[in-house]
Amino acid sequence: MITVKFEVNNIEREIEVRDNETLLETLRERLKLIGTKEGCGKGECGACTVMIDGKPVASCLVLTGQVEGKSIVTIEGIGDVENPHVIQQSYIDEGAIQCGFCIPGMVVSSYALLKEKPEPSEEEIKDALSGNLCRCTGYRKIIAAVKTAGKKIKETGVEL
Amino acid sequence: MKNLQLIKSDNLSELLELLKKEERKYNIIAGGTDVMVLLKEFLIDPQCLYDVSGLSELKEILVDNDSIEIGSAVTMSDIISDSEVSRYAPVLVSALKEVGSPLIRNRATLGGNVGNSSPAGDSIPALFVLNARVNIVSEGNERSVKIEDFILGPRRNVLEKGEIIKSFVIDKMGTDERSFFLKAGSRNALAISKANLAFRFMLKDNLVKSMNLSFGSVGPVVIKSTMIPQLFIGKKPDPGLIDKSCSLVSEEIKPIDDFRSTAKYRVKVLENLLRKCLDEFC
Ligand SMILES: Cc1cc2nc3c(=O)[nH]c(=O)nc-3n(C[C@H](O)[C@H](O)[C@H](O)COP(=O)(O)OP(=O)(O)OC[C@H]3O[C@@H](n4cnc5c(N)ncnc54)[C@H](O)[C@@H]3O)c2cc1C
Ligand code: FES
Ligand code: FES
């Protein structure tokens, strides 16, 4: 076991984890942040997307021992049912959610993109979401949701 | 995943010292995008992992008069967004943009791509045409080898026990040079290459002054073309030369007939990719 000190959704954590424990396991099993999903477990689907120091990554391929001193943001740090983030609200408004399994990862990737580029082109949206697979929606509505979210963020001046 | 020990350090010499004394079976881990998959699939079974992802000594990009040194633990995303690398080694940036997805590129390192030594590693053909040298360090020792001598076969390289890749030194391309990286996979994102090529050349007074060409994913290791540059150097490129060079592709490569693609298909794909590059500059 090793002790790791890091920040999750702005809260300092110091926890003991197994040496071979993935960040995904720590988030879901130890911290009960079950919004982050496990799909393939091999970096291919993006269901497990979280941000490390602002960059979206596949948490199934990261060892918790590797995130010492880093800041992690999960879907729970972006918004919840009572207080959905504009990005989440845009996904709902555009009808971009079907089964919902891919959505936490999609929203985290969308957040990271919009923070860097408030007005992304369609190509930039597609590239930013290219590691997040969706079996249900066919992506069109997801892309529309990201565009809408970008507009709303600009209009309302919310800080990401 | 099997139990193992994770060993970290924020100091390179300390890590190298530990590594030298290590008697157990170990693996280096950087971004983990290959290692974690191999561990989960039980394709490797180390007793410990040495994490180099936190070593600041391996995370620098240094630009010199005629070369650029890129630390082995710099992530692909950081290389792509570096303005000097984009300006002086655009072929490397084009290659890295083809890797996986942003989720992968935000973790994956250049050291990991080369350390993994897969014939499908997208950075490798680009490093070939940039005449990359691999700087290797171990406790009390440093050596440097050419990229084409570094990789010995699929997943095999010259690293000895206790050694890690410190950095890569690549040519700075001149403003009068052009380059391409082209990849054929089965879909746009997240596709492992079926065939790829990196191409760098310079024309002077309409004649080919220099040309570097390499093919990836088609043999056990990346291949540096010798016949095709020889054919062009000193000549004015024309459709006849292009046809001839495309017919040399099958002589230069020994394509692998694996599950991803058949050999014949790979040769055809490479011929087409090459023709695309050559048509651009003729
Ligand atoms: C979904 C997915 C898609 C992918 N798509 C592509 C793709 O399109 N193109 C492509 O080329 N690759 C692809 N990859 C493979 C992988 O992302 C790359 O090879 C990546 O560059 C590995 O870097 P890493 O830092 O994650 O390496 P790790 O997994 O940490 O290490 C890889 C290997 O290199 C060794 N190593 C790492 N750093 C060093 C060092 N400093 N010194 C010595 N040895 C070292 C390790 O021991 C290991 O053997 C993909 C992987 C996934 C999971
Ligand atoms: S679960 Fe991590 S990418 Fe699929
Ligand atoms: S909504 Fe079902 S996988 Fe995307």
Image: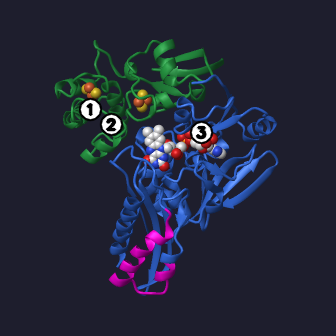
Compared to residue B194, the image places residue A27 above or below, namely above
Numbered-mark total:
3
Q: Residues at badges 2 and 1 in contact (C-beta under 8 Å)?
A: yes
* Residue B279 is at least partly visible in this image: yes
* Residue B175 is at least partly visible in this image: no
Chain B tint as drawn: blue
Chain to which the residue tagged by mark 2 belongs: A
Mark 3 CB in 8 Å range of ligand 1? yes
Q: Residue at 34% of width from left, 68% of height from top?
A: B276
Q: Nearer the viewer, residue B145 or B40?
A: B40
Labelled disc at residue A76: none
Q: Nearer the viewer, mark 2 or mark 3?
A: 3
| Residue A14 shown left or right of residue B179 in the figure | right
Q: Residue at 40% of width from left, 15% of height from top?
A: A34
- Residue type at mark 3? Ala
Q: Residue at 45% of width from left, 28% of height from top?
A: A41
Q: Which residues are magenta?
A: B229-254
Residue B251 is covered by the magenta coloring: yes
Q: Nearer the viewer, residue B24 or B123?
A: B24
* Secondary element at tag 3: loop
Q: Nearer the viewer, mark 2 or mark 1?
A: 2
Compared to residue B222, the image places residue A87 above or below, namely above
Residue B17 is covered by the magenta coloring: no
Q: Reading the chain from its start, which is encountered first: label 2 or label 1?
A: 2
Labelled disc at residue A153: 1
Chain A tint as drawn: green
Compared to residue B167, the image places residue A127 above or below, namely above
Label 1 and label 3: CA atoms lie apart by 36 Å
Residue at which label 2 appears: A114
User: Residue A97 placed where, x, y %?
Assistant: 22, 25
Q: Residue furthest left?
A: A94
